[in-house]
Every structure is written in structure tokens, then in C-alpha cells.
Image (cartoon, rainbow, N blue to C red):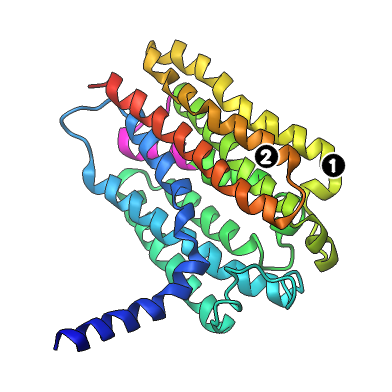
Amino acid sequence: MSCRAEETEGSRVHLLRPWLNVARPGNLFHEAVPLLVGASLVTASGNFPWLRFLTLAAIGLTIQPAVRYLNDPSDYYRGIDQPGRLKAYHALNQGLDLTLVRRVGLVCLAISMALCVWVSLQVDWRLLLVAGAIAFFAVTYAGGPWPYGSRALGELAQFVWWGLLPTVLVVYVLGGRVGFSAWIAGCALGAMFTTFQLANNQRDVETDRVGGKITLPQLIGGSATRRLFAVLMVVPYLLLVTLVIRQSNPLVLLPLLSIPFAGAAIRDFWKARTPADFALLFPMIARANLGFGLLLALGLWIHWR
């Protein structure tokens, strides 16, 4: 019986692995960090809204796979991702049917939006408008008649939808108001997270050009892209000064401990030219992103304890 149970469990893992690879759970820190930083900015003690916090976490866990599952079919049908230009984690390389992938993406998006509706009705009905905008921009990033992700707007989308807006919304949902510190923290996270998108587009600059996808590195060139990457890495650390003043909290400077990761990412990005170079670069960017965000959340949280 135990052998059969192990075989069944192994079969389930085998079936789920391609879906997990496409969803890229390793990038979930883009959802987790704004949630933790936003929660740490909320000063309420003793009556922390745990149900809302967990609901926001569930929204993050469903919105990321929704975007991934919707993007792969759209990019393939538009000719951006084609045989010979497919990434290892693309749905086709994982042996998945694109029609089914799109359907699962829509289901994930529907679940996320249902949770957004519940939160909106609990907090502020105007958040329904934000939920609608999130759904619209999630679908039209790679789909629709004018996919803005193919119009050199991917970096802006990353800044707004994965850094700034989530941080501000978390603070509002959990605390009922949004102060200046939430906007500063959101901008810091947005700038840091945008480095991921910029590096991704720089790696794919030639294949995207062949596929007809317009990206920022194509428009500004490699040298300007490298300088922009360095600026985006440095700006979050400069914004810490404003947060220290606003919060009267020197622990906000804890993210300075992540500077070695950021410096290494800048150095490696400046030298990266081949896919192998970028394969080594992305883990370093992730360490810088995660280190900065978690240390910021920790510094804010300790202060209010």
C-alpha cells in the first residue's frame, strides 16, 4: 500500500510540475514583499486584520499564475514566442496545451477577482474600480488588440502593478488610510522590481525584435539600458533616507545590508551578454530584490513593536 501511495504521490507531482514551472513560483516574492512591507507600515496593534491580510496573500498567489498562464498563449499566437525562441519555462516547452493553459489562467484570474470583490465590499466600494483595472491590465499585457507589454511599457507595468500599487493597496486595506511613507516604500519596491523586467528584456532583445515585440532596451540601446539598471538599483536605497525621516526609525536603514547583492547585480548586468550570463544574473537580482524588501519590512515591523 505504501508503494502505491508513493507512486500516486509521485504521479501527482509529475503532473503539477509543468504548471508550477510556467507559473514560476520562485518569483512569488514580487507578491510577498509588498504585502509584508505594507503590513509593517500599518501601525494598528492588537487588532491586526488577519483575515484581510490572508485574503490579500491569496490574491497574490492567484494573480501571478493568472498572468503567466495568460501571457504564454498570447505571446505564442502573436509570433513573439516560436519554436527555437521558446524559454525553458514556456508552456509549450513544458508539454502543456495552450488552450487549456489560457483557461486555467482565466480561472485563476476569476478567483483573484472574486477575492478582490470581497475585500472591496469589506473596505471601500471604490476598490472595485481598482480590481477591474487589475483584471483589464492583466489580460491586455500580452493579449487584446494593443498588448502594452509589447509596446515598451513592460518596465512601467512592473513598477506600478508589482511594486507601487500593491504596497499602497495593502496599507489602505489593512490600515484604512495611506500616508506618504506608503508611496515612498511602494516607489522603492517598484524601482527594485523593475530591474527584473529590464534584465529580462535586455536578455531577449534580439529574439523580441525578430518576433515584433518592442521593448525599452530596443529603444534606448544597451549602454543606456545598463545605466538605467544601475539607477533603478540605487534609487531604492536613496529613498530610505526619506523613510527614515518620515518614520523617525533608523531601523528602516536595515536594507543597506543588501547593498552587496545590488552591487553584484549591477556589475554582472554590465557584463552580461549571453544567455548563460543572464542565467547567473537573475538569481543575484532576486537576492537584491528579496533582501531589500524583507529587511525593509523587518525594520518597519520592529519599530512598531
- Label 2 secondary element: helix
Say few, some or many: other residues with alpha carbon within 10 Å of mark 2 (under 14 / 14 to 19 / 20 or more).
Answer: some
* C-alpha gap between disc 2 and disc 1: 20 Å
Asked which quadrant contains residue 89, the reply is bottom right
Say few, some or many: other residues with alpha carbon within 10 Å of mark 1 (under 14 / 14 to 19 / 20 or more).
Answer: few
Instruction: Tell me the amino acid under the disc marked 1.
Output: Ile
Q: Is residue 117 left or right of residue 136?
A: left
Q: Nearer the viewer, residue 60 or 174?
A: 60
Say which quadrant the C terminus sits in: top left
Q: Position of residue 171 (x, y in %)?
A: 38, 34
Considering the whole magenta stretch, tell me its main secondary structure.
Answer: helix
Instruction: Tell me the amino acid under the disc marked 2.
Output: Asp
What residue lies at 49% left-to-right and 65% top-to-bottom?
23
Residue under pointer 1: 220
Q: Position of residue 205 (x, y in %)?
A: 79, 55
Q: Position of residue 76 (x, y in %)?
A: 69, 75
Q: Which residues are magenta?
A: 166-179
Residue under pointer 2: 268
